[in-house]
Amino acid sequence: MNTGNKKILIVDDDSFLLDMYALKFSKSSFDVSTALGSEPALEKLKQGLTPDIILLDIMMPGMDGFELLTKIKEENISPNSIVIFLSNRGQSSDISQAESLGASGYIVKASSTPSEVIEKVEDIINKSKQE
């Protein structure tokens, strides 16, 4: 599937995972930006980065992914971005919280290969376009 070079911002505090997902997404024709944690992500967005998709981890030092999404919404930063959580936490309470904050999707890292993560992100993008 051709995503038409969708811009994605990947936010995670694990540099190995960040680099690996950045490589995988760029090989799938995504225009990739990365941020090693919530604060750098918020800074990039405030400086004018407007990704089509924000792929967001939950567990990060300082500000977690839920807090980052709350700030993005409160400050109306990048309002047209599709936000998808990518986390090892798969509890229904986390998934519910992500949905209540306006996330379009939730992917559990541990139960998805990187290729499956890309497929799921593409599915979420396609569903968002239809709404």
Image (spheres, rainbow, N blue to C red):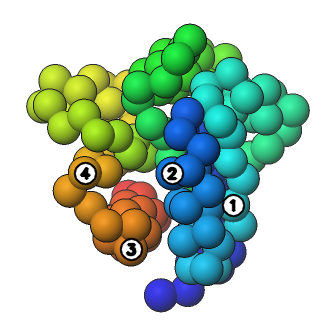
Name of the residue lying farthest toward the top: 62
Name which residue lies at 41% across and 29% down: 58
Give the mark toward the camera: 2 or 1.
Answer: 2
Question: Disc 3 and disc 4: Cα gap in Å?
Answer: 13 Å
- Dot 2 or dot 3, earlier in sequence: 2
Occupied quadrant, residue 40: top right
- Dot 2 or dot 1, earlier in sequence: 2
Looking at the image, residue 28 lies above or below residue 82: below
Question: Disc 4 and disc 1: Cα gap in Å?
Answer: 22 Å
**Residue 123 in view:** no
- Cβ atoms at labels 3 and 4 below 8 Å apart: no
Q: Secondary structure at mark 2?
A: helix
Please rate how many residues cluster around mark 3, counting C-alpha atoms within 10 Å: few if below 14, some from 14 to 19, many from 20: few
Looking at the image, residue 68 lies above or below residue 4: above
Residue assigned mark 1: 32
- Dot 3 or dot 1, earlier in sequence: 1
Q: Amino acid at mark 1?
A: Val
Q: Amino acid at mark 3?
A: Ser
Q: Amino acid at mark 4?
A: Ala
Give the mark toward the camera: 4 or 1.
Answer: 4
Question: Disc 3 and disc 1: Cα gap in Å?
Answer: 16 Å
- Dot 3 or dot 4, earlier in sequence: 4
Q: Amino acid at mark 2?
A: Leu
Left/right placement of residue 83 relative to residue 110 reads right
Name which residue lies at 72% across and 53% down: 33
**Image position, residue 117 (x, y; %):** 37, 64
Name which residue lies at 68% across and 22% down: 39
Residue assigned mark 2: 17
Name of the residue lying farthest toward the bottom: 1
